[in-house]
Image (cartoon, grey):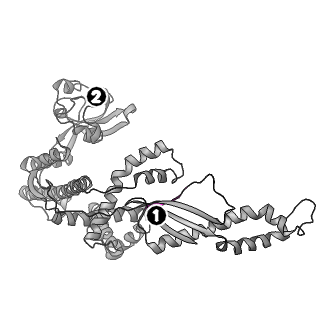
Amino acid sequence: MDIKRVALDAVNETIVMTVVHMDYKGQVAKRINEKMPLATVKGFRKGAVPKDLVEKQYGKPIKQEEVKKVVDLALERYLASERLNLLGTPLAKENENFNWDAEELTFEYEIGLVPAFEIDLDAKNDIVKYIVKADDKLIDGQVERIQKQFGNPIPQEVVVEGVDIKGVFTNEAEGIGNTTTITLSIFKDKATADKFIGKKVGDVVTVNTKGLFEDDHQLMDYLKVGHDNVHGIEIDVDFTIEAIAISEPAELNQELFDKLFGAGIVASLEDLKAKIKEDAEAQFAQQADQKLLGDVTEFLIENTKFDLPSEFLKKWLQTVGEKKLSPEEAEVEYARSEKGLRFQLIEGKALAQNDIKITFEDLKTFTTKNIRQQMAQFGQTNPTDEEVQGIVARVLSNQDEVKRLSDQVVAEKLLEIFKVKANPTTKEVTYDEFIAASYGE
């Protein structure tokens, strides 16, 4: 058998395989001999059919089966020996006029190759690494929320200014159904707030989302509307009142501090504010890191140029998956997934250029850290190593979890590379300024 590759361009090639009689005749002859005792042809007893008649009746399908086995095995071994970096899998070229009686049988396979490229993390960019600070407004607001949350609710008969109103925002057509607690001060328009005055438990108040709050992003909190939908949404939502209460603020004393943070961690209002600031800024740092990772990702996708075997991949998409795609559906799917594919290649190149590999120990360490953090959130601040490792073992026995956590480990390692190599400009901002920068508003 002769196998060769024909380059069409940098990312598209054809594998040409030429099969001759010697490659399959022995196996075909063996299969014919095995068929002889079982063959049935009219006019002959079973097992007494002449060999030439058996070959005439069964020879062609047997030949086709054996040739396919030879070609499939040869293709598999060739791809392994050549160590080709493929996108998708080889696609057999169709030939409606294929001649199975020819002395030489030629099969062609289209392949798409991973493009060769380099990424330049040192390239000039306007990427910003945000340092998000908790300002006095945010800290004081959090103190007020703590006092309200742990205060003593006093039930009220009707809605008046200053009460807390628990209820459900609903709009069945839009899939909205969120239980929340509101105050009348959250509404942008006094006329909206006035709709609630005098209402009782069980009453329903209908409001419109357009201009409902001072900041449209509050729709994300109170109605659980996605960010992509907060601007321009103009629908009626019903608020069904479930409870009305005035909250008597909790006293800021040692009992409350110990309940919130553990015995002796916080001993004064100043300590409480310092703790709020520390915890908030740690959370903000994670959000800022995610923005940095996203911004560098977008920069690399836009500025790292390489060709993909797009036409090949569109054809390949038609052949994979349980539901075969039409050419039009494959075109749509390729357009949807191209950006993600480009970043997968860039991600792999960034890890390779910086000689970074993801090991099982990396995954285990990352998972252990996550488990300890989650346990701490539920009050288990000092679990034993045995307890933690037992949970880690169970988590890592789930392949879906392994994939999810592996992606997070990769993102963490990429982030460390980007922080250094992309040389972003550092900028200190408040949380409100960070939100504005994150959503371009």
In the foreground, 434 or 108: 108
* Amino acid type of the residue that numbered disc 2 sits on in the rendered structure: Glu
Mark 1 and mark 2: span between their CA atoms?
58 Å
The residue beneath circle 2 is 234
**Image point (52%, 73%), residue name:** 77
Q: Earlier in the sequence, mark 1 or mark 2?
A: 1
Q: Main secondary structure of the magenta part?
A: strand
Q: Which residues are magenta?
A: 87-93
Answer with the quarter of the image where residue 107 lies. Answer: bottom right
Examine the structure image and report whether residue 90 is included in the region drawn in magenta: yes
User: What is the count of numbered marks?
Assistant: 2
Q: Position of residue 203 (x, y in %)?
A: 32, 27
Relative to 190, 2 lies left or right: right
Question: Dot 1, how many residues are within 10 Å of its Cα: few (below 14), some (14-19), or many (20+)?
Answer: few
Picture quarter with the N terminus:
bottom right
Image height check: is 233 above or below 272?
A: above
Picture quarter with the C terminus:
top left
Relative to 2, 145 lies left or right: left
Relative to 125, 111 lies left or right: right
The residue beneath circle 1 is 6
Q: Are circles 1 and 2 on residues that touch, CB within 8 Å?
A: no
* Amino acid type of the residue that numbered disc 1 sits on in the rendered structure: Val
Residue 304: tell me if it is visible: yes
Q: Position of residue 14 (x, y in %)?
A: 48, 61
Answer with the quarter of the image where residue 114 lies. Answer: bottom left
Q: Position of residue 180 (x, y in %)?
A: 28, 40
**Image point (72%, 70%), residue name:** 28
In the foreground, 299 or 373: 299
Examine the structure image and report whether residue 231 is included in the region drawn in magenta: no
- Residue found at the very far front of the displayed protein: 103
Image height check: is 359 above or below 329?
A: below
